[in-house]
């Protein structure tokens, strides 16, 4: 169980780094998106950065998939499929001559929708932890809303699409950071974040 969680945390950590790098690049290029002379160049740079991030994440997911082995078929299949989709999307953005920020948003939308649905599923299992449940439920609903907006955002301007992508990246980082830095330890009582050796240390 711990080895599985460690692998999930590795993927989440790398995704956080890639998203953070994209947000920093976006903040640096945002002034250029409102300048008609520099808008095309800035958009192209962001498309290339998104393509590189997707391909990198896809390769990581493919590598992690085989670490689970055949005993964990669900994780193996999930990471294989996500990895292939990420690599295919990244390669399309890299070689397409018509790719734009709106195209990046279109390819990013399914990931946001899947992430949002996953959060709603997690929230449904946290009835005994209302605080965590509300936070995860709210994040999932916002992710779904942004995913829908990006999926049908072909008429959005480059600046609006970039801002929406930036907000989605920041929200995803905030959702993933607790998982990256928080190691869930379960006890016979099913407590969250409790040390399994605590009962042994406290025993008389």
Image (tube, rainbow, N blue to C red):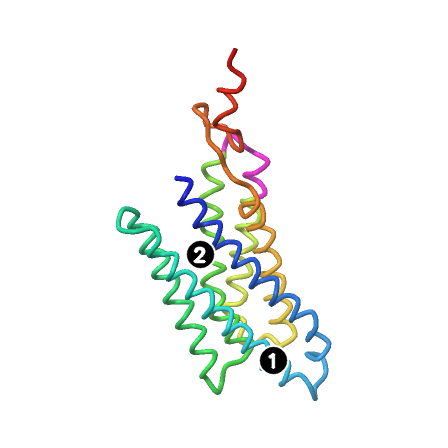
Which residue is located at x 38 percent, y 60 percent?
A: 63
Crowd band around label 2 with a 10 angstrom C-alpha radius: few (<14), some (14–19), many (20+): some
Residue 10 in the image, given as x and y percentages of width and height: 48, 53
Which residue is located at x 48 percent, y 20 percent?
A: 200
Tell me if 47 is positioned left or right of 1 in this view. Answer: right
Q: Residue 114 carries which label?
A: 2
Determine the image quadrant of residue 89.
bottom left
Tell me if 61 is positioned left or right of 35 in this view. Answer: left
Quadrant holding the N terminus: top left
Provide the major secondary structure of the magenta segment: helix
What segment carries the magenta color? 127-135
Residue 15 in the image, given as x and y percentages of width and height: 52, 59
Which residue is located at x 45 percent, y 23 percent?
A: 189
Tell me if 114 is positioned left or right of 75 in this view. Answer: right
Using the image as rendered, state which of residue 52 and residue 142 is in the foreground: 52
Residue labelled with disc 1: 43
Crowd band around label 1 with a 10 angstrom C-alpha radius: few (<14), some (14–19), many (20+): many
Whether residue 87 is situated above or below residue 122 in the rendered picture? below
Tell me if 17 is positioned left or right of 24 in this view. Answer: left
Under circle 2, the secondary element is helix
């Amino acid at each position: 169980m711990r080895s599985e969680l460690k692998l999930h945390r590795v993927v989440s950590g790398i995704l956080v780094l890639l998203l953070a790098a994209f947000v920093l690049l976006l903040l640096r290029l945002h002034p250029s998106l409102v300048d008609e002379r520099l808008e095309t160049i800035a958009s192209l740079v962001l498309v290339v950065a998104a393509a590189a991030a997707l391909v990198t994440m896809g390769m990581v997911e493919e590598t992690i998939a085989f670490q689970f082995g055949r005993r964990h078929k669900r994780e193996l299949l999930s990471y294989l499929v996500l990895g292939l989709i990420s690599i295919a999307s990244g390669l399309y953005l890299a070689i397409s001559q018509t790719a734009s920020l709106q195209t990046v948003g279109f390819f990013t939308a399914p990931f946001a929708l899947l992430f949002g649905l996953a959060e709603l599923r997690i929230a449904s299992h946290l009835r005994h932890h209302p605080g965590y449940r509300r936070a995860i439920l709210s994040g999932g609903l916002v992710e779904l809303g942004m995913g829908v907006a990006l999926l049908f955002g072909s008429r959005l301007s480059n600046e609006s699409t970039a801002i929406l992508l930036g907000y989605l990246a920041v929200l995803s980082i905030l959702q993933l950071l607790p998982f990256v830095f928080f190691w869930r330890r379960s006890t016979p009582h099913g407590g969250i974040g409790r040390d399994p050796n605590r009962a042994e240390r406290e025993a008389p």
